[in-house]
Image (cartoon, helix red, strand yellow):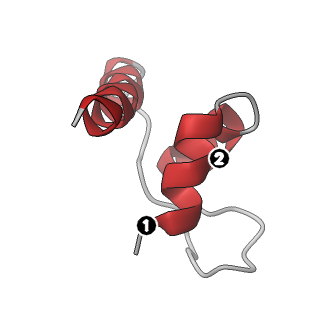
């Protein structure tokens, strides 16, 4: 439960930041091989580079 709360807290932080900056969440194409997956997904993938908890969540989520 603690792990899930930490993950959702970090995801909410990204949502708040994108809202504050008035940035779109989605990209033009969001398939696995797209170069631009959207600001939200790109931001989470960037965070995952230095956060093993987020990396694990992104790898194992549906």
Q: List x then y, in percent, for residue 12.
A: 29, 30
- Quadrant of the rendered image containing residue 61: bottom left
Using the image, determine if residue 52 lies above or below residue 29. above
Secondary structure of the residue carrying numbered label 1: loop
What whole-number distance in Å separates the C-alpha atoms at marks 2 and 1?
Answer: 13 Å
Q: Say which residue label 2 marks.
A: 45
Q: Say which residue label 1 marks.
A: 61
The foreground one among 11 and 30 is 11
Using the image, determine if residue 36 lies above or below residue 8. below
**How many numbered marks appear?**
2
Q: Which mark is residue 51?
A: none
Report the quarter where the C terminus lies: bottom left
Q: List x then y, in percent, for residue 55.
A: 62, 47
Q: List x then y, in percent, for residue 43.
A: 59, 39
The foreground one among 36 and 32 is 32
Residue for point 40% across, 21% down: 17
Secondary structure of the residue carrying numbered label 2: helix
């Amino acid at each position: 439960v603690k792990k899930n709360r930490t993950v959702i807290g970090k995801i909410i932080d990204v949502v708040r930041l994108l809202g504050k900056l008035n940035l779109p969440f989605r990209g033009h194409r969001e398939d696995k091989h797209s170069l631009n997956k959207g600001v939200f997904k790109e931001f989470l993938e960037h965070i995952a580079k230095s956060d093993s908890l987020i990396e694990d969540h992104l790898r194992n989520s549906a």
